[in-house]
C-alpha cells in the first residue's frame, strides 16, 4: 500500500482485518509504504483484499502471489527501509476527540496530560528523523514506555495498539514554565494553570506547540494585543484567534458548513472567516478588514489553556515579524525574551518546525493559502524523472523535491528577505532530501536573477533549470486539476514576477502546456515611481495610473513615474485602485491595500466597470522557449486596458460609496476572466497567483462561470500564491526533460 499510510494507525487496522479472516502473515512499514504478507484460502484472501479497499478507498494497492505461504498468527513486525522512499511522510494531526475525552476525564490516568496521543493523532512529521515511521525514527525514542503504556501498545484490542507516539504522565514528555531570564517558575499541570493566570492578567506567553513556538495573549484585551504587535514589529497584519469550539467562533464570525468542516479537520488550520458586528474582540486583531483567522485547539495543552482562560486567545507564530518560526527551547528563551513575558517549554524535540496552515473557503471549496502543519508535506504521483530540487521564488517560499517517483511540496518557510529565513531554507533542502533518501541532480529556480533562491541554485554543483514565474503558477494549477498532459488557458495574476522581457509581469494570460507557453495577453503596463517603494506606498501607483488618463501630475513625480520600472501586474493594479478609492497612503505588508478594498465591497452593487482589449486575443498553440513572449503567430500579445476603469473611478468618487466602486472593480476583473475563458471554451481555464486569494473575486467568478457554462478551474489544495510555486517548477522541468530527453532542460 502506497500513499499516506504511515502514522495513521493503518497497520493495527490491517492486523485486525486479517485476524477476523483467520489469515496468517504479517504487516510492516517500509520505504515503499505498508507491506502485507498474508496466507489463507482463496475466498478468505479475496474478502480480505475487498475489505482493505473499502477501509482505505484512497490508497494505491498492488499485489502479487507469494513464493512461500505464511503460517501461524497475523503479526505486526519490525519495519525495514530501502534505498529510496516511495511513500508519503505522515502529517501532524490535531488531538482526536477520543484523546480529548480521556484528557478531560478525571478518572482516566491521562487526565490533564497535555501530550496525550494515539495511533490516529498527534505529532508525526514534526518529530520525524527518518522513514519508515516508527518510534525509533522519531524524537519519541528517548521516552521509554512505562509498563502500562507498553501493555496498551501490545494489545490488539486497545486503540493505542502500535501507536508510535504513545505516552502518559509517567513516561512521556513534560512541560514547565520559565520567566524571561529562564528561571523555572512552575512544573507540569501547575505550569499550565499559572500560564493561564498570566494571560488573564494581560501578559504575552510563548508556548511550545507541536511544531514550534507560538505567541499567545488575550484576544479581548486591546492593550495586550497592542503590546504583541509592538514587540513583534507586526503593526497591521491580521492576528489569528483560537477558540474552544465552533459555537464559540460563531459568536464573532460567520461559519458555513464548509468552514466548520475545515475548522474541525485533522489538519487544524487557521480558517479565514467573515466577521460579525459587535464581537467582544480587540479591534486591533484585523484592522480595516472584515475577516478574521480562527482556529480550534490543536492539542490537549491548547484546549486546557483556552478553557482555563475562558476567552478567545491570539495564537500566532513564535518569531519576530518576517523571520521563521522558532522551535528550539534555548533559542526561544533567548530570542523571544523581548516579546514574551513568560514561557511554556516542553522536552519533546522538534525536527521539522512548521507554522500553522491557513485556508479560506469559496462556497463548498477549501482553498489553501499557507500549506504548513497538517497539510504539508504534500505528495503527488510523478512516476518518471530524475531527482531534482525546486526552490520557489522570493516570497512565501516552500521547497519541493522530485524523488524519482513523486513530487513532494514541503511546508511553508517564508520570505527570503531575512538571513534567518535563508538559513531555514537551506535546512529544509537538506532535511527534505535526507528524509526522502534522494540526492538531487538538478536545481530548478525562478528566472529572477537577484532572488536568493536563484543564487543558491547557481552556487550548487548540480545542473540548473530556470522557469518563468507565471508559467510555474500555471503548472501548479495544472497539477491541481490533473491537467498536466493538457493545454490550458492560464490566468496568472499576482504582484511580482520576472518577465521574459526583463520587466515585472503579474497580469498574464498564457496559453500553456507543461513544457511551454505563449503570452496571449497581459494587463496594460504602467510604471512604479520609486520602484519597490510603490508597493508599500500605493499612492504612488495611483498617481502612475492617473498619469495615463490625463490627470495633471507634479513635474517631480512625473519624472519618477517615467523613470520607474514597468509592470503589467494585476496585484499592483489592485493596490493603485485601492489607494484611489480608499485614500490609502501606505501599508505595512504587500497585498494589504487590496485586502482593504475587498473588505469594503458592497455586495448589493451589480454594475461593473470594464477592461478594454487593444487587440483580439489570438489563440493558437503554446511555443517552446525560443518563442516566449509572443502573442500569436508573430503577433504581439493583446493588452488588457484598465484606463477606462480608472476614468470611471475618478468620476464615481464624487457620487458613489467606496463599497460600490470597489465592487464594480471586482466585477470588472471577474468579467475579464470569464470573457477570456469564453473566447475558447474548448480549453480548460485555470486561475493562479496571489490575486485569486480574493474571496469576493472568486465568488463572482464561480457564480458567473456557472451561469455561462465555462470550464474555469478554481484553486484548491495547493497554495494559489507563491507557496506552491516550487512544485510547478518541477512539473515544468520534468515535462521539458521528457520532451528533450535531457536530465535537466
Image: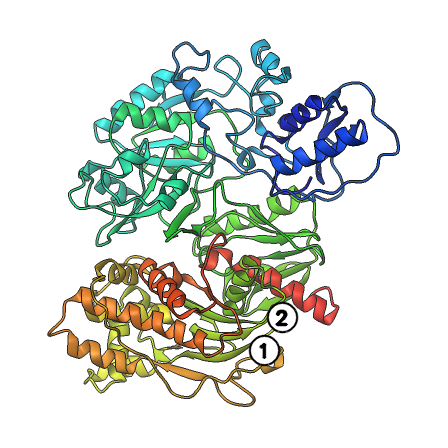
Q: CA distance from mark 2 to mark 1?
A: 9 Å
| Place of residue 439 in the rendered image (x, y in percent of width and height, measured from the top left) | 70, 50
Is 268 drawn above or below residue 668 in the view shown?
A: above
In the image shown, does 617 or 336 lie closer to the viewer?
Answer: 617
Q: Is label 2 in contact with label 1 (beta carbons under 8 Å)? A: yes
Between 588 and 639, the one nearer to me in the picture: 639
Work out whether residue 318 can be spotted: no
Looking at the picture, does residue 553 appear above or below residue 306? below
For image coordinates 33% across by 64% down, the residue present is 700
Quadrant showing the N terminus: top right
Residue 211 image offset from top left, x and y in percent: 47, 36
| Residue of label 2 | 515
**Residue at the extreme left:** 655
Q: Quadrant of residue 212?
A: top left
Callout 2: SS: loop
Residue, disc 1 = 622
- 626 relative to 709 in the view: left or right: right
Q: Which mark is residue 302?
A: none
In the picture, measured across the screen, residue 485 lies left or right of residue 267, that is right
Name the side, left or right, on which 51 lies relative to 557: right
Residue 64: % across, % down: 81, 40
First in residue order: circle 2 vs circle 1: 2
Residue at the limit of the structure toward the bottom, as seen here: 634
Q: Is residue 596 above or below residue 29?
A: below
Residue at image point 31% right, 73% down: 668
Quadrant of res 589: bottom left
Amino acid at each position: 500500500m502506497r500513499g499516506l499510510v504511515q502514522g495513521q494507525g493503518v497497520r493495527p487496522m490491517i492486523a485486525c482485518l486479517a485476524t477476523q479472516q483467520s489469515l496468517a502473515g504479517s504487516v510492516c512499514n517500509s520505504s515503499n509504504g505498508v507491506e502485507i504478507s498474508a496466507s489463507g484460502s482463496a475466498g478468505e484472501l479475496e474478502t480480505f483484499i475487498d475489505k482493505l479497499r473499502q477501509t482505505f478507498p484512497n490508497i494505491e494497492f498492488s499485489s502479487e502471489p507469494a513464493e512461500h505461504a505464511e503460517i501461524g498468527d497475523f503479526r505486526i513486525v519490525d519495519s525495514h527501509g530501502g534505498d529510496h522512499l516511495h511513500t508519503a511522510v505522515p502529517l501532524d494531526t490535531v488531538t482526536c476527540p477520543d484523546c480529548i475525552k480521556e484528557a478531560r476525564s478525571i478518572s482516566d490516568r491521562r487526565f490533564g496530560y497535555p501530550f496525550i496521543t494515539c495511533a490516529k493523532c498527534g505529532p508525526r512529521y514534526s518529530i520525524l528523523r527518518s522513514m519508515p515511521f516508527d518510534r525509533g525514527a522519531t524524537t519519541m525514542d528517548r521516552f521509554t514506555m512505562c509498563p502500562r503504556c507498553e501493555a496498551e501498545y501490545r494489545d490488539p484490542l486497545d486503540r493505542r495498539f502500535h501507536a508510535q507516539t504513545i505516552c502518559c504522565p509517567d513516561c512521556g514528555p513534560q512541560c514547565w514554565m520559565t520567566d524571561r531570564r529562564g528561571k523555572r517558575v512552575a512544573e507540569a499541570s501547575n505550569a499550565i494553570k499559572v500560564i493561564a493566570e498570566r494571560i488573564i492578567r494581560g501578559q504575552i506567553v510563548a508556548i511550545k506547540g507541536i511544531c514550534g513556538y507560538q505567541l499567545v495573549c488575550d484576544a479581548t484585551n486591546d492593550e495586550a494585543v497592542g503590546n504583541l504587535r509592538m514587540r513583534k514589529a507586526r503593526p497591521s497584519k491580521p492576528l489569528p484567534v483560537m477558540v474552544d469550539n465552533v459555537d464559540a467562533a460563531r459568536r464573532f464570525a460567520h461559519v458555513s458548513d464548509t468552514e466548520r468542516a475545515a475548522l474541525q479537520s485533522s489538519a487544524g488550520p487557521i480558517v479565514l472567516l467573515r466577521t460579525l458586528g459587535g464581537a467582544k474582540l480587540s479591534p486591533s486583531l484585523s484592522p480595516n478588514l472584515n475577516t478574521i483567522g480562527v482556529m480550534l485547539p490543536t492539542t490537549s495543552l491548547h484546549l486546557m489553556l483556552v478553557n482555563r482562560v475562558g476567552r478567545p486567545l491570539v495564537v500566532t507564530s513564535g518569531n519576530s515579524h518576517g523571520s521563521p518560526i522558532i522551535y528550539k527551547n534555548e533559542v526561544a528563551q533567548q530570542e523571544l525574551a523581548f516579546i514574551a513575558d513568560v514561557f511554556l517549554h516542553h522536552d519533546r524535540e522538534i525536527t521539522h518546525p512548521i507554522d500553522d496552515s491557513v485556508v479560506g473557503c469559496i462556497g463548498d471549496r477549501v482553498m489553501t493559502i499557507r500549506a504548513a502543519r497538517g497539510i504539508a508535506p504534500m505528495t503527488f504521483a510523478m512516476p518518471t524523472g530524475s531527482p531534482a530540487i525546486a526552490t520557489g521564488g522570493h516570497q512565501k517560499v516552500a521547497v519541493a523535491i522530485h524523488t524519482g517517483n513523486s513530487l513532494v511540496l514541503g511546508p511553508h518557510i517564508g520570505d527570503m528577505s531575512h538571513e534567518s529565513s535563508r538559513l531555514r531554507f537551506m535546512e529544509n533542502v537538506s532535511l527534505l532530501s535526507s528524509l526522502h533518501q534522494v540526492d538531487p541532480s538538478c536545481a530548478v529556480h525562478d528566472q529572477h536573477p537577484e532572488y536568493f533562491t536563484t543564487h543558491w541554485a547557481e552556487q550548487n554543483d548540480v545542473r540548473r533549470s530556470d522557469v518563468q514565474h507565471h508559467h510555474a503558477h500555471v503548472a501548479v494549477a495544472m497539477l491541481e486539476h490533473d491537467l498536466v498532459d493538457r493545454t490550458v488557458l492560464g490566468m496568472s495574476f499576482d504582484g511580482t514576477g520576472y518577465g521574459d522581457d526583463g520587466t515585472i509581469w503579474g497580469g498574464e494570460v498564457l496559453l500553456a502546456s507543461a513544457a511551454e507557453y505563449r503570452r496571449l495577453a497581459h494587463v496594460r503596463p504602467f510604471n512604479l515611481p520609486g520602484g519597490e517603494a510603490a508597493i508599500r506606498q500605493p499612492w504612488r501607483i495611483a498617481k502612475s495610473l492617473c498619469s495615463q488618463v490625463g490627470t495633471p501630475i507634479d513635474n517631480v513625480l512625473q519624472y519618477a513615474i517615467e523613470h520607474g520600472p514597468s509592470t503589467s501586474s494585476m496585484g499592483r493594479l489592485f493596490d493603485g485602485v485601492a489607494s484611489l478609492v480608499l485614500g490609502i497612503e501606505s501599508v505595512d505588508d504587500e497585498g494589504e491595500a487590496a485586502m482593504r478594498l475587498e473588505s469594503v465591497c458592497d455586495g448589493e452593487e451589480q454594475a461593473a466597470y470594464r477592461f478594454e482589449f487593444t487587440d483580439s486575443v489570438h489563440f493558437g498553440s503554446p511555443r517552446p522557449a525560443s518563442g516566449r513572449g509572443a502573442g500569436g503567430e508573430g503577433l504581439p500579445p493583446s493588452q488588457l486596458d484598465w484606463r477606462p476603469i480608472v476614468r470611471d473611478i475618478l468620476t464615481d468618487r464624487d457620487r458613489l460609496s467606496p463599497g460600490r466602486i470597489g465592487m464594480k472593480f471586482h466585477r470588472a476583473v471577474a468579467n475579464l476572466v470569464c470573457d477570456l475563458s469564453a473566447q475558447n471554451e474548448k480549453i480548460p481555464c485555470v486561475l493562479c497567483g496571489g490575486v485569486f486569494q480574493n474571496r469576493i473575486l472568486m465568488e463572482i467568478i464561480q457564480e458567473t462561470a456557472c451561469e455561462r457554462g465555462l470550464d474555469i478551474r478554481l484553486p484548491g489544495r495547493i497554495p494559489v500564491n507563491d507557496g506552491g510555486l516550487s512544485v510547478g517548477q518541477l512539473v515544468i522541468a520534468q515535462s521539458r526533460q521528457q520532451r528533450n530527453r535531457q536530465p535537466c532542460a
